[in-house]
Amino acid sequence: MKSNHLLLLIVLFLFSCQKEKIQLVPSEFEPYVDEFFHQAQLRGYDLYKEDFDFSITLEEIEDPFRGGECQFRGNKITIDIQNWERGSEEWKEFIIAHELGHCLLDRRHRNVKTTSNECYSFMRGGKQDDFSCSQNLYSTKWKKYYYDELFDRSTPFPIWYYENRDYPQLNTSANYLLEWKDTLVESFEINDIDFQSIENFLVEIDFDIINTTSNSFRFSLGEIKFGGCPKCIASSLDVQKDNRKWYVSEWLENNSKYKLSIVRRGKFASFFLNEKYHHTIEFDAFEGNGFYFYSFRDQIENVSVKVISY
């Protein structure tokens, strides 16, 4: 009887000596930490904040290109104060997920990108690693993939990425909704096509920049802007919405003739330059039918516009 009582006391003592996990998370970080664990649980992982020791502090990091860092010993995360203060909500969610990926999931940087400059992972490095790629922080489709990969490194690249890379090969059933040409154009606008109701379409804008001083061009459909700066010394193509860059290509080769294209296939839209694939997002992001093209500072030559349903 005494031995049983002694055993019970020992068990109670051992339980009382177990160290409680401590999370030192200032309130401004809590929504993003909670989102990290919420995303884990959505995918069936039994990860809970209370099961980990970790801390997050807001300080100045000497390297201006580093948004945050994790000290694996002690799971101490530091977020750079300047980057945090000017970061969007989406960037803040990303940087917290990235650093928690280091400290709690033991993930290292995965510096891999596609031929169209898409990041493979939330765990990509940055300029401090001499690596850059385009990470779409604003698309719900890309966000889902990045969280899938964060918790399971073996996650394949999304199938919709591969299904939307090919340029359409039109047949005799294609319907030309608009064909328009002009020799000199600075801007034009079209508002009488209901793009939202067309399940599959191709929009093409061809133009020359040989004799123009303009160095930047934009093609806007709904809320999405697509274009670049072909005459800049270091030129890239980008996709923007609400003054936020959803995608940035690698440097482009200078050319005299350009074709900007948007292709819709059902729920997705893809972007092409000279029929070369660049990026795919969900079509819901466009939110409108306004179709607008403009150049900066000067007219451009031999503009041809086609809108085709197929």
Image (cartoon, grey):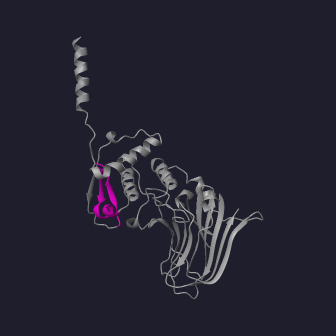
Q: How many marks?
A: 0
Q: Quadrant of the N terminus?
A: top left
Q: What is the x, y in percent for residue 42?
A: 46, 42
Q: Which residues are magenta?
A: 65-86
Q: In the figure, is residue 162 to the left or right of 129?
A: right
The relative height of residue 192 versus residue 138 in the rendered view (above or below) is below
Which residue of the protein is positioned furthest toward the front in this rendering? 192
Q: What is the x, y in percent for residue 47?
A: 39, 40
Of residues 275 and 192, the one drawn nearer to the viewer in this rendering? 192
Q: In the figure, is residue 240 to the left or right of 93?
A: right
Q: Quadrant of the C terminus?
A: bottom right
Residue depicted at 32% across the width and 39% down the height: 50
For residue 182, say whether it is visible: yes
Q: What is the x, y in percent for residue 20?
A: 26, 37
Is 148 colored magenta in this rendering?
no
The relative height of residue 10 versus residue 161 in the rendered view (above or below) is above
For residue 72, say whether it is visible: no
Residue depicted at 78% across the width and 65% down the height: 172
Residue depicted at 61% across the width and 57% down the height: 162
Of residues 49 and 229, the one drawn nearer to the viewer in this rendering? 229
Q: In the figure, is residue 138 to the left or right of 277?
A: left
Q: In the figure, is residue 60 to the left or right of 138?
A: left
The relative height of residue 287 versus residue 50 in the rendered view (above or below) is below
